[in-house]
Image (cartoon, rainbow, N blue to C red):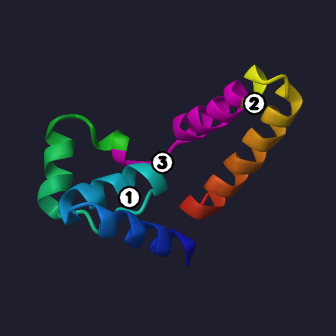
Amino acid sequence: EIQESLSASITRYLNPEVGSVAAAICIGNKSALSSETKEVFQKAGLSHVLVVSGLHLSIWCGIWTALLGRIRFRKMGIVVGILLSILFAMITGF
């Protein structure tokens, strides 16, 4: 699965604890998070950060729209942003 492969790549280049948090935030794979890490995020009121949401998609789409819009390809930026958002949703399991 793509999500597992990406998660493995992320944790390979970072230490296991940081990599598991990065994988949860970036692609929604929380399987590698320790119960201690989950508890720390919950007690800090930040557990929502570990869940991929519409905010993540909005940021993703906004970045591409802004980048391509600056070089006079606004329509292409919107299309690329939408396509990447759909891809992102597929990877994270909708």
Q: Which residue in the structure is indicated by mark 2?
A: 68
Check disc 1: other Cα within 10 Å, few if <14, some if 14-19, many if 20+.
Answer: many
Are the residues tagged 2 and 1 within 8 Å (C-beta)?
A: no
The amino acid marked with disc number 2 is Leu
* Residue 68 x, y percent position in the rendering: 75, 30
Label 3 secondary element: loop
Q: Is residue 62 left or right of residue 82?
A: left
Looking at the picture, tell me which residue is in the foreground, 20 or 70.
70
Q: Which residue in the structure is indicated by mark 1?
A: 23
Is residue 28 at least partly visible in the picture?
Answer: yes
Q: Is residue 24 left or right of residue 55?
A: left
The amino acid marked with disc number 3 is Val
Looking at the picture, tell me which residue is in the foreground, 5 or 56.
5
The mark nearer the N terminus, 1 or 3, is 1
From the viewer's perspective, is the residue at label 1 or at label 3 nearer? 1
In the displayed structure, 50 sits above or below 14; it is above
Q: Which residues are magenta?
A: 50-67
Q: Which residue in the structure is indicated by mark 3?
A: 52
Q: Quadrant of residue 77?
A: top right
Query: Magenta stretch: residue 85 in it?
Result: no
Check disc 2: other Cα within 10 Å, few if <14, some if 14-19, many if 20+.
Answer: some
* Residue 82 x, y percent position in the rendering: 76, 42
Q: How many marks?
A: 3
Q: Is residue 64 left or right of residue 57?
A: right
Is residue 31 at least partly visible in the picture?
Answer: no
Q: CA distance from mark 3 to mark 2?
A: 24 Å
Q: CA distance from mark 1 to mark 3?
A: 10 Å
The amino acid marked with disc number 1 is Ala
Label 1 secondary element: helix
